[in-house]
Image (spheres, grey):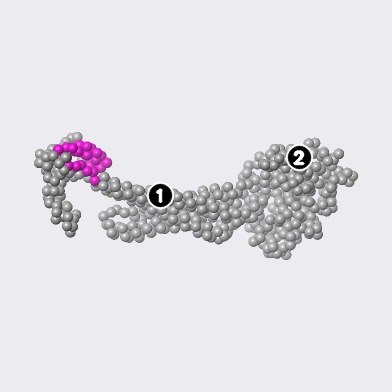
Amino acid sequence: MRFGFVFGEIGHGLRRNVSMVVSVILVTFISLTFVGTASLLQLQIGQMKSYWYDRAQVAIYMCTEVSPADVCAQGEASTDLKMAVEDKLKSPVLAPYIKQYFFENHKQAYDKFEQQFAGNSVAKYVSPSQLNETFWVSLKDPSKSQIITESFSGVAGVEEVRDQRSYLDQIFNILNAASIAAVGIAALMLISAALLISTTIRLSAFSRRREISIMRLVGASNFYIQLPFILEGVVAATVGSLLAAGAVISVVQFFVQGYLATKLPFTNFVNLNDALLVSPVLVGAGIFLSAIASGFAIRRYLRI
Amino acid sequence: MIRIENVTKQYKGSSRPALNNVSLEIEKGDFVFLVGASGSGKSSLMRLMLREDIPSSGSVHVMGENLVAIPSRRIPYFRRKLGVVFQDFRLLPSKTVAQNVAFSLEVIGKSQGFIHEAVPDVLAMVGLEGKVDRLPNELSGGEQQRVALARAIVNKPAVLLADEPTGNLDPATSEGIMALLERINLAGTTVVMATHDRGIVDRLQKRVIEMREGEIFRDQRSAGYQKTQTDSHPVGSWNLAVDQSWNLDGNN
């Protein structure tokens, strides 16, 4: 094996097809950036899920004087009804599932409301008695909220049982849809990258058909004939995937950590370590894809 | 060295086979002219010997390799033992004379040291010492064919296939190429040359295999371009090893 010869051939091929090589680099760059962004988004969703799901509680809203009459026929929940709910939470049936619970009365609910809507005129129109008294229940396993929902729905004095996760799920669904869209776009672009690579390689092989025919005539092995072409595709795609890795790392470093994290300080964002985890995967995928695409192209072009 | 037995080659979409039950044997050190009109099957025969193609039926053995059954990964190694030249020279226009010859050694993985020694030697042998750094388009046709010959023999092949090597050359230049081919042959290389050049075949008086419509019409030792009754001897009478199935129906 004479590496000097092989590398000389690769350099030759890359120079001869500059415009095609640049388009291969750009298409792999963009498609792999999409792949990287989608995987970081998935990591972000995973992190947020594990953070928020653990903190998500089930709220048992008790009836107030303004609750709709069809569920709260008796009006404001009486002390007895509240006691009944608390007893049920303490009962041996439910107690094993519950980590802790606390009761929030009208006054506490109003304080929280005021705090949340400070400076908003809506606070002026709300009185403490309009806000639900609430049992906040933290579960040992947040995914088993069904048990609480089923036990308390329709119980006298209870207006509504609500799992906070249902709010979170909406957010996660949006993020999920975004990452699926990114993956879809990436898949389409990766297909076009693969086709572009095989076209480029075929073009390159065609422009060197005299050399190839002489190589075959004098008995160069298939491997020796094909290697420069395969490596040509791999080199172009590697440049593209390195750019994609760089883009993903700088998005995380400068946008997510540098901007988002300072604006939203209480959210746990993906960090540089995650980006450094994704980057080699991108480069590997780029190399693998281009090797397959160019190997396939050259094999079809160069039959013995 | 080359043994072809009952070979038929039928191309798709053509009613008449390009080769029809052809058998022949070429011994080590032979010099054979393959003659015949265009479309008579010469080129098909050459392609089979190069393993550019396989026959529809029959067997082709060259240098001990069964070319019908050879696995494709071994074809390159088979071709390294074979030299080929063509009518159109097939040189790389962007490479100098020396680089053209060196290229054929580089791509089969020969060392730089070997190349530095072998290339000047072979160029001297074909008479191109002073032109190693010229580009092909700065050379005459005869000189270009010498480069192609140098490339074909630099790896010391046992068999040299020449497909109309003088087809693009004037008679005087052709003489020079033929002298070179004879020297190569005298050094022990089997030479098979397809040609239309009547003058050359008549003058050299080598073995002549004449093809007509895909069949061997004549196979004679020390013969000329056209069939003669008196001065020439059918190969069958000289060589007892000749297979009786040879198509010698022209020698009645």
- What residue did someone put label 1 on? A183
Q: Say which of A282 and A156 sits in front.
A: A156
Q: State the residue at coordinates (34%, 59%).
A: A255
Furthest residue in direction top, as rendered: A93
Q: Is residue A99 visible?
A: no
Whole-percent x and y of residue A1? 59, 53
Furthest residue in direction front, as rendered: A69
SS class of the residue under badge 1?
helix
Q: State the residue at coordinates (84%, 51%).
A: B202
The quarter of the displayed image where residue A157 is located: top left
Whole-percent x and y of residue B120? 70, 60
Q: Which residues are magenta?
A: A138-165
Q: Which mark is residue B76?
A: none
SS class of the residue under badge 2?
strand
At label 2, the amino acid type is Ser
Q: Which mark is residue B23?
A: 2
Q: Chain of mark 2?
A: B
Whole-percent x and y of residue A121? 17, 57
Q: Say which of A235 and A131 sits in front.
A: A131
Horizontal placement of B129 versus A79: left or right?
right
Q: Chain of mark 1?
A: A
Query: Across the whole image, how many numbered discs are drawn on residues?
Result: 2
Nearer the observer, disc 2 or disc 1? 1
Q: Is residue B251 visible?
A: yes
At label 1, the amino acid type is Val
